[in-house]
Image: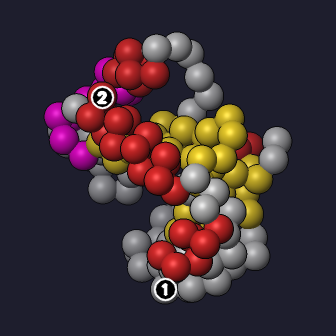
Amino acid sequence: MSEICTVFENVTQPRSSKRLSFDDLIEMAQNPVTLPKTDARAIAPHTANEKTKTAVLAHDSMTMLWQDIDDGNLSLSDIKQKLTLALWSEFACIIYSTASSKPDNRRWRVLVPLMMPLPCERWLAAQAALTEMMG
């Protein structure tokens, strides 16, 4: 599968030449690393080599949507149902619990690769629509 995102070694690293495929993201979700948030890898939903706003806008090619679900203590099946209703069909995505998730306060992240990259303006609209549909 082709590269769908750029990974930075940590949140302070401004440049990266390492990109990941959907399969790489699945592997990371299945084998999480426990690190402080400031030391953990940062995944960007584009294939630009930088994560500055200027560089991302110039690259103008977003490859993935994401959704953080930090409220409602939803189950995995609740998330899947909401996503299916929001996107009107079955699709490939990655859903994983975040490091701050607790049994009585579940938190999730959803990564949705795009079939084709979107320009930043259209991507912002798609992100907003997904957020609204997910509640």
Q: Which of 62 and 11 is in front in this view?
A: 62
Q: Which residue lies furthest to the right in this view?
A: 1
- Horizontally, residue 120 falls left or right of residue 61, namely left
- Horizontally, residue 99 falls left or right of residue 57, namely left
What residue is at 38 percent from the left and 22 percent from the top?
A: 86
Residue indicated by mark 1 = 12
Element on which disc 1 rests: loop
Q: Nearer the viewer, residue 102 or 2?
A: 2
| Quarter of the figure that contains the N terminus | top right
- Horizontally, residue 131 falls left or right of residue 125, namely left
Element on which disc 2 rests: helix
Q: Could one spot residue 120 in this view of the protein?
A: yes
Q: With respect to residue 42, does 4 lie above or below?
A: above
Give x and y (percent) for residue 88: 46, 14
The label shown at residue 26 is none
The label shown at residue 133 is 2
| Quarter of the figure that contains the C terminus | top left
10 Å crowding of disc 2: few (<14), some (14-19), many (20+): few
What residue is at 61 percent from the left and 72 percent from the top?
A: 58
Inspect the magenta stretch and tell me whether residue 11 lies in it: no
Given contact means CB atoms under 8 Å apart, are the residues at marks 1 and 2 in contact?
A: no
Q: Say which label, 1 or 2, has the lower sequence index.
A: 1
Q: Which amino acid does label 1 sit on?
A: Thr
Give x and y (percent) for residue 90: 56, 16
**Segment tinted magenta in the rendering:** 70-80
- Horizontally, residue 13 falls left or right of residue 88, namely right
What residue is at 41 percent from the left and 74 percent from the top?
A: 36
